[in-house]
Amino acid sequence: MKKYVLVIGVFFLFFFSFSSPSFALLSQSINPDESWLTIYQDIDRAWVAEKVSLSLHQGENRFFLTGDNLLQERFYFHPYDPSTTLKAMSTTPTNGYQIEIEAQQSGSYAFLLSFFMSGLNWKEHYMAIWDEKNSNFYLYPSVFLSNRKNINWKNIHVSWLLGKPAFLFDGDKGGISEDEALGAAKGIQPQVMMAREKPVVMERVSEYQVFHLPYIVDLPAQSVLQVFPGMRKFPITEIIRVEKGNLKRILKMKSVGDPLPQGWVTIFGENQSVLGTFQFPLVRTQEEFEITVGTIKTLQIERIEKSYKRLKVDLNEERNIAGFWSEIIIEFELINRGNISKPVEIIEPLPVDAKLTGSEDWRWEDGNAHLEITIEPDQREKVTLKYEFREVWS
């Protein structure tokens, strides 16, 4: 069972003005019969699809569609009923559309109206509990769907799309700032929704993933709808990574469910202490991923460049000095002052064409020297990296 939170905030109307008495159709003001909203991430846009009903007379009908929130890009109007035909559609000087429809007989007919609207966005935030003793990571995703327009949506189907769209827009975003919206401005109180049996549903569409809320909701003006898709549990491996002497604490996991959008994650320990808020990467299905969670006080490391010396001269065909073969020795001293053994991964960048020459279990990978060791509690370890490389004489 899931809980959903709604931040309350008013309703959206489309106005159809019909003209030309030769078409024998009066003006109409209509409300959508059903609305769908697909919100894109980080482009300040949503795709609006609405099912509307129009009363038509037999023969040709002409009307004008107006609305301050219409974007001229990719406007779509299509009849549901095969007994009606879209004859023509053109733009007007007032940022509207003139539409001509032919009906075989008088009656009420359904149409699909779709367009882009600005001022909507979504972001992901996570809460997590790290069970260090049992090596488990409990992730609690939440999605913030923000409506920064002065438009009130009632009883709509809401979806959000993960994936970078192939199109871009220009222009002012308008509305209140996203920080204000996500902060739930004064006077807007969150309403806790009842637990639902149906979880959020993910659908794969081409290279995108679309997440669907499985019930209709309201999305008031200048408000945020917060959705909790459900807890995810991951077996976790902790490693301490040392790069160029800098120590990082890394949590490694593998995703086996739906993709996870990038965002921020606030991690709690078993005793409910806050470890901090960290960046969460974009994670695809079956993909291994890492979260960097700062440093660790109980593990210390010291990196010392012990020696540098030139081993031999490299001569060119004219017997002039072209370069030198040199040797570098780096020593790492690691101390574990905790009561739990810690796996450590040391990564040291290498010059081009460097050769590892030491006796330690170092390996070359992607231009770096790698070493993996485990430091037991209350233990001190010393490891040495030795390599040769060619210096060009200039």
Image (spheres, rainbow, N blue to C red):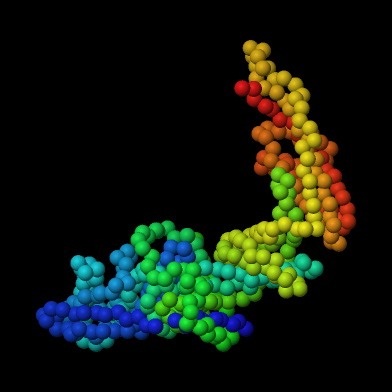
Which quarter of the figure has residue 309?
A: top right
Location of residue 255 with respect to 361 vertically, above or below: below
- Residue 217 vertical placement versus 207 (above, below): below
- The front one of 128 and 201 is 128
x, y percent for residue 136: 74, 68
Q: Is residue 243 above or below residue 390?
A: below
Whether residue 76 is visible = no
Query: Position of 258 compared to 238: left or right?
Result: left
Q: Quadrant where the N terminus lies? A: bottom right
Looking at the rendering, in which quadrant would you find the C terminus? top right
Q: Nearer the viewer, residue 298 or 236?
A: 298
* Residue 70 falls left or right of residue 18: right
Furthest toward the right, the residue is 378
141 lies above or below 310: below
Q: Residue at x 79, y 32 (%)?
A: 307
Is 148 placed left or right of 13 in the picture?
right
Residue at (74, 33) in percent of width and height? 355
Rendering coords of residue 9 (x, y %): 44, 81
